[in-house]
Amino acid sequence: MMIQITVNGTGEQYTSGVTLLDILQSRAISVESAKGVAVAVNDRIVRRGDWNSVQINDGSNIEIVTARQGG
Amino acid sequence: MMQADNKTTVKTEECGDWLRIGEMKLKSRLLLGTSGYPNPQVMLESLAASGTQLVTVAIRRVNLSDHSEESFLELLQSLPVQLLPNTAGCYTAKEAVLVAEMAREALETNLIKLEVIGDDETLLPDVEQLLKAASDLIRSGFTVMAYSNDDPITCRKLADMGCAAVMPLASPIGSGMGIVNPYNLQLIRELIPGTPLIVDAGIGTASDGAKAMELGYDGILLNTAVSKAKHPVQMASAMRHAVMGGRLAWMAGRIPKRFYAQASSSMEGRVQVLT
């Protein structure tokens, strides 16, 4: 079964049972390479160490951020 | 031989006049933003010329189709500066708290420049949401540096609740209008003697920065005045000197203003001209 989720504002389809880590790895973000990155699922921070244990449900909203130019 | 009648030495940034915010101890009292420079090289040279040790960054979505932008953070982390993430673009306390938490996770810092704005036209803070966000973040262990209106009562509330620095604006963000209400800024300084105060936003040129320091402020935070100057690196250097000059003048203590002139040279012993 496929589920619909939103990643940084864009709607995407994934297989049911997918973890946050699966989704991040599919976007070339791994725990090791993710220094300077933070992730929130449905407005809650998910710490790097927990990425593997968080299962993503249908309709979830994932935000992946980093530091950019700012004043 | 002339002799100084007062041998008190004035502290300078080179000998112990540090800016302390939370657990930070900074020699430079100039905080600089990283946005809007013509290119990364000019940004790096401007940061170096300014002497800043604390630079602001925004928290934004990772570009999932182009990872080349990740080099921005690597570039900054190679410099002898600390990063001060902001909550720019947040309109509610809820948004600001989430962005602050994401900043803490991404950058491993408790520091946050808290901005909660009321509208797009003025970018002025929404006081109600700002106070709520500040209170929530302090409770969660953040070192909050709060961007505020130049309203003495709001600033005092932010200081009383435990913000590590209170940062009233000189004028709206990016306007370059300088200090539009020096009376309020002076009042804020007098009402809040014990919390670091930083003038944030609206600085247009070096004299604005010097003036803010002469009002007794502990530091200046600016971005556009440098990044959009005709020659950003020169302006960064000008700001560095202005902040140092203003700080020294504040510590030295200016003379009172007089309505009439007062001769510097004594009238005693002047020559008489025969008429």
Image: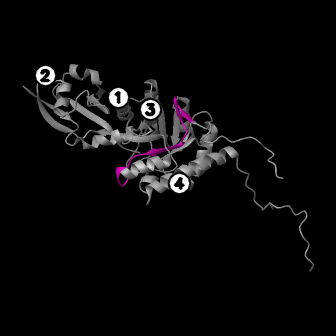
Task: Give the percent coordinates (x, y) of residue B219.
Answer: 55, 42
The amino acid beneath tag 3 is Leu
Tell me whether circle 3 and circle 2 mark residues in contact (CB < 8 Å). Answer: no
Q: Which residue is mark 3?
A: B111
Q: Which mark is residue B238?
A: 4
The amino acid beneath tag 2 is Gly
Mark toward the start of the polypeptide (1 vs 4):
1
Residues at marks 4 and 3, CA–CA distance in whole angstroms: 27 Å
Tell me whether circle 3 and circle 1 mark residues in contact (CB < 8 Å). Answer: no
Mark toward the start of the polypeptide (4 vs 3):
3
**What secondary structure is found at the residue carrying circle 3?**
strand
* B30 or A19: nearer the viewer: B30
Q: Which mark is residue A8?
A: none
Residues at marks 3 and 2, CA–CA distance in whole angstroms: 36 Å
Report the number of discs. 4
Q: Which residue is mark 1?
A: B105
Residue A8 versus residue B274 in the image, above or below: above
The amino acid beneath tag 4 is Ala
Q: Is residue B84 magenta?
A: no
Q: Which residues are magenta?
A: B19-40
Judge the density around disc 4: few (<14), some (14-19), many (≥20) Cα neighbours within 10 Å. Answer: some
**Left or right relative to B58: residue B239:** right
